[in-house]
């Protein structure tokens, strides 16, 4: 049987065959039964954000729906549950399991009024996250509208054989499970049309990241005390979302070089993956080799912190707060430059960003308009620190440029409101 013929089979037949395979691979679970107890009279807006990055990109949208009613925040990674809850304490938080059959149990506990997917995955198994077609199919079975906002394409291959099979069988079905496909660029729009998207559901609204320049901080008492202590520093460099060992080396080398003329300079460094012991181990080894003294954020007593040379941020959801007290910032490759820019901070970054990342268009606009300092190496970063750490810097012009790029949030809210009213 040819691949083309298989894809032409009716969706219920393809789904039945895939379900047999899925059960063989994953076993039969309690959630696979027909019992879906609707034990909650309230209804929820479901919002899927794979990581902190997607949550930050769509933060104002989440705030909007939290103000309207109950919200269930969903991620495919349990490590983000605590930080999601800290940012949105009035929302419920849960994990969308790899086994899509658990969705039925979630529907019982948190009956959905509507569901929103933030940024990714726009195409099935196209991005570094896992959201099964089975989840969307289950929601559609319960007559729940599903909306994609701020859509972005990574162009990744499926992460495993099972995902490859699901992608092959249901990529177009996944795409057309959405009642709205709101995307960032016309290039993405054209790609989705080529993959079989319904043009009537597809709209370009721009990037909602520009609507999330709010500098309000959600702080625990411990974090607030720590910020007060850090705010008393005369020269503080915050390096966020530092991605890997080579980038640790660049940041540390630039910091050491800059300290030759600014001995009071301190560093707060936030690795992109603090949950990976090998990453923290490599960072520790580098700091020890440089003769630098350091503490871990998770281990310091805020009320008695005497910041040594370096503070390692090994927690989730606090980086924005550290940016707020910095004198100069560095953002790791492919990550969110808008957070430090929103505080009016001078920001530096390398130039070797990947075009597939959703942060790339923001980076290119900022680079083209002189909003950030793009450096080539440790010498360039050290020079940036020497120039900006002690400079009376104003970010007013940058903020004006960023605000002029906003507006996607209101478009998405209006589109969803109109579609819900028409149901």
Image (cartoon, grey):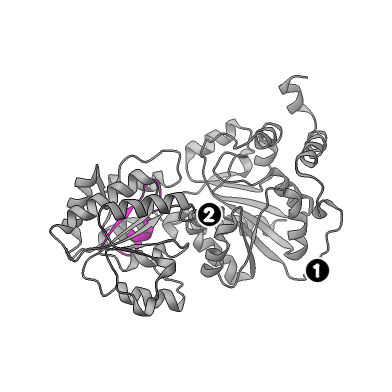
In this rendered view, identify the residue nearer to me: 303 or 412.
303
Disc 1 packing (10 Å; few <14; some 14–19; many ≥20)? few
Cβ atoms under marks 2 and 1 closer than 8 Å: no
Q: Is there any visible trace of residue 263 in the rendered image?
A: yes
Residue 376: image location, x then y, percent: 24, 42
Residue occupying the point 34% across, 67% down: 324
Mark 2 lies on residue: 51
On screen, residue 290 above or below 394: above
Mark 1 lies on residue: 39
Residue occupying the point 53% across, 34% down: 190
Residue 339: image location, x then y, percent: 38, 59
Judge from the rendering whether residue 85 lies leftward or rightward of residue 349; answer left or right.
Answer: right
Compare marks 2 and 1 and give the one earlier in the sequence.
1
Q: Quadrant of the C terminus?
A: bottom right
Q: Residue furthest right?
A: 34
Give the extent of the magenta segment.
328-346
């Amino acid at each position: 049987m040819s691949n083309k013929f298989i894809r032409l089979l009716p969706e219920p037949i393809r789904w039945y065959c895939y379900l047999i395979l899925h059960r063989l691979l994953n076993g039969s679970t309690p959630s696979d039964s027909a019992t879906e107890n609707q034990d909650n009279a309230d209804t929820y807006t479901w919002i899927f954000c794979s990581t902190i990055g997607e949550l930050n990109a769509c933060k104002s949208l989440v705030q909007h729906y939290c103000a309207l009613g109950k919200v269930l925040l969903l991620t495919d990674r349990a490590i983000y549950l605590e930080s999601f809850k800290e940012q949105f304490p009035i929302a419920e938080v849960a994990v969308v399991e790899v086994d899509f059959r658990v969705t039925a149990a979630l529907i019982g506990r948190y009956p959905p009024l509507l569901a929103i997917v933030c940024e990714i995955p726009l195409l099935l198994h196209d991005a570094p996250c896992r959201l099964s077609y089975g989840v969307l199919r289950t929601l559609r079975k319960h007559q729940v509208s599903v909306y994609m906002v701020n859509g972005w394409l990574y162009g990744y291959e499926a992460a495993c054989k099972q995902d490859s099979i699901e992608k092959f069988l249901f990529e177009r079905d996944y795409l057309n499970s959405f009642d709205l496909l709101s995307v960032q660029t016309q290039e993405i729009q054209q790609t989705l049309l080529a993959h079989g998207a319904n043009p009537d559901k597809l709209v370009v609204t721009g990037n909602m990241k520009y609507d999330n320049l709010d500098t309000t901080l959600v702080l625990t008492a411990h974090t607030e005390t720590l910020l007060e202590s850090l705010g008393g520093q005369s020269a503080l460099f915050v390096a966020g979302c530092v991605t890997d060992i080579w980038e640790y080396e660049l940041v540390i080398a630039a910091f050491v070089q800059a300290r030759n003329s600014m001995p009071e300079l301190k560093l707060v460094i936030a690795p992109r993956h603090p949950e990976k012991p090998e990453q923290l181990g490599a960072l520790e080894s580098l700091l020890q080799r440089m003769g630098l003294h350091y503490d871990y954020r998770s281990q310091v007593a805020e009320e008695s912190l005497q910041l040594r040379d370096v503070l390692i941020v090994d927690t989730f959801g606090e980086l924005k707060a550290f940016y707020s007290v910095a004198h100069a910032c560095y953002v790791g490759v492919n990550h969110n430059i808008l957070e430090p820019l929103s505080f009016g901070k001078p920001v530096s970054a390398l130039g070797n960003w990947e075009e597939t990342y959703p942060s790339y268009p923001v980076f290119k606009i900022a680079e083209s308009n002189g909003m950030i300092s793009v450096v080539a190496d440790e010498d360039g970063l050290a020079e940036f620190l020497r120039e900006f750490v002690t400079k009376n810097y104003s970010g007013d012009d940058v903020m004006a440029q960023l605000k002029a790029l906003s507006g996607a949030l209101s478009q998405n809210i209006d589109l969803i409101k109109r579609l819900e009213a028409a149901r």
